[in-house]
Amino acid sequence: MQNQDRVQIGTVPIDVVTMSDAVERVSQQLNADSERPYVISGVNASFVTTAKGNPILACYLFKTDLNVADGMSLVLAARILRSRLPERVTGIDLMIELCGLASVTGRSVYLLGGMKGAAEGAAVWLKRRFPGIRIVGVDRPPMGSEFEPGEVEQIRNRITAAQPDLLFVCLGAPRQERWIKEFALDLPVKVVMGNGAAFDVLAGFFHRPPHWIQKIGMEWFYRMCVEPRRLWKRYILGNLQFVLTVVAQAAELRLHAPTPQATTR
């Protein structure tokens, strides 16, 4: 189900799509017969740096059906690497768009994860935004127990009983990717997507920065200023590692670029 039009940054492939392209692809998959769920990931700079030292995550992202560029840093990096990503497509915004699609097509949604009360709060927000949306499950494993066999079995049984069309998993990266890989690919769902802290944001536990900050790609700086103790290492050291990864990849491309042939008269 993968589309081959992808840009690779580090070890991570990212699909060359706009938001409307991504929604259209998912819409097609909702109407298609498939042996397994269509898997979506919102990829940011942290994914690139983490995947570099985590072969399991790198393999997961290589096999996903749709990876969207959840960060302006990826759009800029693609340009440096002589490729093009048309726009930033954030995971939370894609989730909202897909819930809107579900509301007008009668598709059902299941929310799994988030902080305590976040999935319930996200469900309230989505029902307010999209009256009539069918949310058939709101679930959250106790913190630290998301991989315990008994807890996994209960969650899988509830999802199987609900048979949602779209399953959104918010356990934080890379835990949510591991959960999807190990436990979601044989579930009776059409689409599954990892969404980080999306439920927490929709529930109002965290706030996104003003739109103009998002547009210029400085959302990471806003978040670091809000939570400096928790996020400074992730963004300062992580972003430095991301830049070094892109620079090294660009240098490798230049090194192996074909030499222009001299013309003879």
Image (cartoon, grey):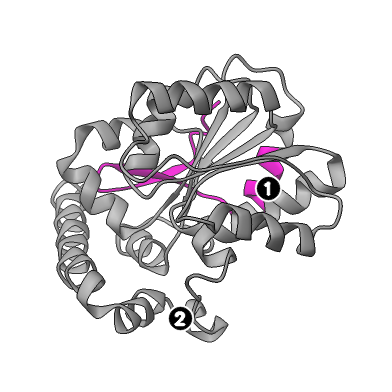
According to the picture, the residue beneath numbered tag 2 turns out to be 216
* Amino acid under disc 2: Ile
Contact (Cβ within 8 Å) of mark 1 with mark 2: no
Q: Is residue 243 in view from this perspective?
A: yes
Q: Which class describes the residues within 10 Å of circle 1: few (<14), some (14-19), or many (20+)?
A: some
Residue, x 53% and y 58% (percent of image)? 118
Judged left or right of residue 260, residue 98 is right
- Res 32 quadrant in image: top right
Q: Position of residue 234 (x, y in %)?
A: 21, 65
Q: Position of residue 93 (x, y in %)?
A: 60, 61
Identify the mark at residue 23; answer none if there is no mark: 1
Q: In what element is the residue under mark 1?
A: helix
Q: Is residue 188 above or below residue 136?
A: above
Q: Is residue 200 above or below residue 31?
A: below
Q: Which residues are magenta?
A: 1-26
Q: Which class describes the residues within 10 Å of circle 2: few (<14), some (14-19), or many (20+)?
A: few
Residue, x 77% and y 28% (percent of image)? 31
